[in-house]
Every structure is written in C-alpha cells, then in structure tokens.
Image: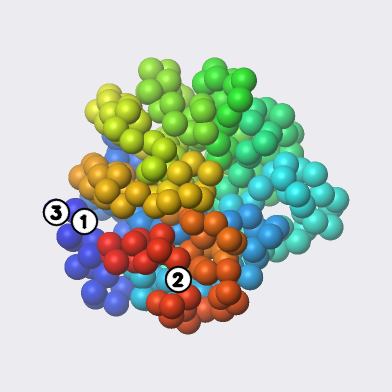
Amino acid sequence: MENAANKNAQMTGTTPVERYGALSVKGNRLVDCKGNAVTLRGVSTHGLSWYPQYVNQESFRFMRDEWGIEVVRLAMYTEEEDGYCVGDDNNRQVLKAVIDKGVYAASKLGLYVIIDWHILSDGNPNQNKEQSLAFFREMSERYHGYTNVIYEICNEPNGNVDWPEIKAYANEVIPVIRENDADAVILVGTPTWSQEVDKAQADPITGYDNLMYVLHFYADTHREELRSKLEQAHDGGLPIFVSEFGICDASGSGAINVEEADKWIELLESRNISYIIWNLSNKDETSAFFKPSCTKTEDYDNSDLSESAKWFIQRK
C-alpha cells in the first residue's frame, strides 16, 4: 500500500521534498514529517572524481520527472585514484565543488541527496578518520539548513574490520555532524561491504536519533541468505537503508539476474526500506546506467540505456 501511495503521489506533480518534508527515523522505519513510512527510490553516482558530468540540474530533473527518482547519492571515493584522502588540497576543493553542485541541484528540484564518504580500499573507516571528521564538520556546517541532505559516513567497511571498530568510528563522527545539524538522517555502514546488519542489530549505536544502518547487495551474488539476514535484523528493530545495489554480480558487471533482483525489490518495498541503484556513468560495466557510446548528460533516450537502467526505470 505504501508503494502504491508513493506512486500516486508522483502523479500530483509535487516534488519528493514537498511530499515528505524533513525525514526522520521512527522505530525501524524512515518516516516523513507526518510520521508516515517512506520508501525512497534513487540512483547513485559513480565516483565523483571520474564521472562528475552527471551531477547537473538537468540530469537530475530528467531522472525525477521521467524515472521517478526521489534521491540521488553523491559517491565520493576516499582512497581510490583522485580520492578525497589521496589527492592534494586542490583535488579536495574540486570534489567539494561537485558535491555543492549536486546538493544545490537536488535542493532546487526537491530531491533528497546523500553525501557519501565512499570508503572502499580503505576498508577500515578509522584509517582516514581525521579527514572524515573534518569533512563532515564542514559539510554539516554548510548544509545544516537543508532538510533534504542525508549523510552516509562509511560506504562499505571491509577486510579485517568488525562492528566494534565501525561503531567506535561512528560514535566520533556522529556528534561532529550533530553539533551543526541536530536532525539530519545519518547512514552507518556495516561490516563485510555493508552486509552484516545483524551485528549492528545486536549492538546498535545509542544516544542519537535519526540513525539508519546500511545494507548493500548485488542480486546475482547476494540472494536468500542475505535477504534473511535483512529480514531478521529489521524485525529485530534495526532501521535499514539500502544505499547501493545492483542487479548483476558483486563486481558491478557480469550477467544481470532479474529474478533475484525482483525478489529483493519486493522485499524492500514490503518493509518500506529505501533503495538506491548503482550507478550513473557510461563505464563499460553492467551496472552503469548508460552505454559506453552515450555521451549525453541529460535528456536520455531508451537507446542510451543499459539493461540495468531499463529494468530499474520500468519498475517506477
């Protein structure tokens, strides 16, 4: 029923932010300003260092109006090539300018926007903790008046890092954001590339409101076992946000698996769990939304799109 209500609301011509207002977390649900459960549906950029061209107002407008997108995730890599923590200060300023452009465009269009500290090869978020603290202090100072901004503080913890270390990191970053923005929703990654939500459910962060825990999946790799883990954690009271998924395997490429992808979306929508697909780029991989031959950054035609994009769009 909630998903049907969301689709009917899209037909009114109002923007997502006009429909839902300031978001918060109530129990294990993301809710709107009236306390009603919300299931946001959106798209993630690829790395802002490599594909900044898709962060523009006309692209966002097209996705909102034609594809029913309600949220855009700005994926800023930290350790990879030209990442925030490995480049010079000029590179950091360039990345922050792309984020600013994305937040401004989303805000003008009434879209929600996620500022994503996209750790990957730096699997332990504590590795670049000091830079993270400074970054989120600056971001929350700049955007504290924006009711549409969501902060994702560690994309995919992985390797030899477990929940206690991630939780300790979160307990340092969250208060830095809360000094400037008392109410914004904050997303916290979980161990093993944001799959072990059960560990967060068994030992959640306390003392703060409006926190959600991240689960990521790629449908041809992650199947019933991970869906069961999500169900059990959610039933145990954990508020979960799927800030990244694909319908191929975990490499971001390979064959798509529509059958498993459909099972995932049916589960998420039945529980009002928001989900964001990876990714806005023309990279030569299955999960990219655009064919490598497509150089457009707005007004996309069906012929420009990958099979992953077509699957996602037809489900709106």
Q: How is the image coloured?
A: rainbow
The earlier-in-sequence mark between 2 and 1 is 1
Q: In this view, does 109 lie above or below 122?
A: below
| Badge number at residue 230 | none
Mark 2 vs mark 1, CA separation in Å: 25 Å
Q: What residue type is labelled 1?
A: Asn
Q: Position of residue 30 (x, y in %)?
A: 33, 45
Q: Is residue 99 above or below residue 28?
A: below
Left or right of residue 19, residue 200 in this image:
right
**Residue topped by disc 3:** 1
**Pair 2/1: label in front:** 2
Mark 2 vs mark 3, CA separation in Å: 30 Å
| Residue density around tag 1, few if under 14, some if 14–19, many if 20 or more, within 10 Å | some
Please identify the quadrant where the N terminus is shown.
Answer: bottom left
**Residue topped by disc 2:** 305
Q: Which residue is drawn at 48% across and 49% down?
A: 254
Q: Which amino acid does label 2 sit on?
A: Leu
Q: Which quadrant of the figure has residue 65?
A: bottom left
The earlier-in-sequence mark between 2 and 3 is 3
Q: What residue type is labelled 3?
A: Met
Contact? badges 2 and 1 (CB < 8 Å): no
Q: Is residue 222 above or below residue 75?
A: above
Q: Residue at x 51, y 49 (%)?
A: 252
Contact? badges 3 and 1 (CB < 8 Å): yes
Mark 3 vs mark 1, CA separation in Å: 5 Å
**Residue topped by disc 1:** 3
